[in-house]
Image (cartoon, rainbow, N blue to C red):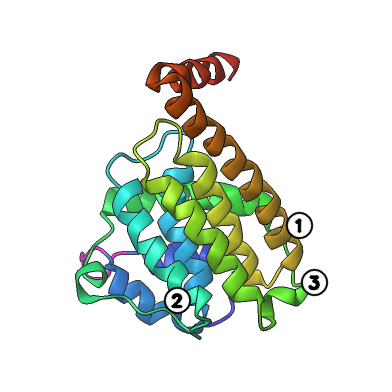
Amino acid sequence: MPDHRLSHTLNLVLRPIEGEEPSLERLNTMLGENGFGLFLMVLSLPSALPVPAPGYSTPFGIVLLFLAGQMILARPSPWLPQGAARRRISRRLGERIARTGERFFGFLERWVRPRHQWISGRWGLPLMGLLTACMAALMILPIPLTNTAPALVIFLIGVGLSEKDGLLCAAACVIGGLAVAFYGLVIYLAFTYGIAGAGELLDWLRGAG
């Protein structure tokens, strides 16, 4: 795929062709060697939105978990099973991802650039795969407010991989660590004080926001 700005690439891969909504298989074919980074962006962005698209966090989280396993094994490009590959991104969701992604990239593209390229080394992709797996697992958990923060971390990893920006990936590691600590606290409260205790923390956070 030619070298384009991320916002242009995102619009390109999500655009319907002859009225047909894009499938994950088509995205995989178009993305080629850039597949992991851009796949992470496309699949995490619906859940990273302030008002997440319902019904996508769990299936996309499962696909992200599958991709994370391949990253841990340092595969050069992603592979999807036929069932996942046939899944289509609706026109409405594709337009929403592209529109919101353009706003994200309008800010990010001024700061993101190739630097600290440790992510291109032997342990870079496996480490990002391990963090992606943790965040995807949090996306799948049926706990309120567990979608946005992990999905945002995965989105930042995707941008960092696509642009070979090790500094951004390092920032994603820090944010991901904080997310794991927070959800660990929620789970601890749920086991110690019951669901009501965890619910009180989440209600407090909603009020604080």
The answer for how far apart the CA atoms under marks 3 and 2 are is 23 Å
* Location of residue 160 with respect to 2 vertically, above or below: above
Amino acid type of disc 3?
His
The foreground one among 200 and 43 is 200
- The residue tagged 3 is 116
Q: Secondary structure at mark 2?
A: helix
Q: Amino acid at mark 2?
A: Gln
Callouts 2 and 1 close, C-beta under 8 Å = no
Give the class, few, some or many, for how many residues have Cα within 10 Å of label 2's Cα (few <14, many ≥20).
many
Residue 6 visible in the shown view: no
In terms of sequence position, does the residue under pointer 3 or pointer 1 come before the other? 1
Q: Which residue is mark 1?
A: 111
Helix, strand or loop under label 1: loop
**Residue 22, horizontal then vertical, whole percent:** 28, 66
Q: CA distance from mark 3 to mark 1?
A: 14 Å
Location of residue 164 by image quarter: bottom right
| Residue 117, image x, y percentages | 75, 75
How many discs appear? Answer: 3
Q: Nearer the viewer, mark 3 or mark 2?
A: 2
The residue to which callout 2 is attached is 70
Disc 1 marks a residue whose amino acid type is Trp
Give the magenta range.
16-21
- Residue at the right extreme, as displayed: 116
**In the displayed structure image, the side of residue 208 where residue 40 appears, left or right:** left
In which quadrant of the rendered view does residue 209 lie? top right
Task: Report if residue 179 lies within the magenta region.
Answer: no
Question: Residue 68 at x, y = what percent?
Answer: 46, 68
Q: Main secondary structure of the magenta part?
A: loop
Side (left or right) of 16 relative to 175: left
Please, what secondary structure does the residue beneath circle 3 have? Answer: loop
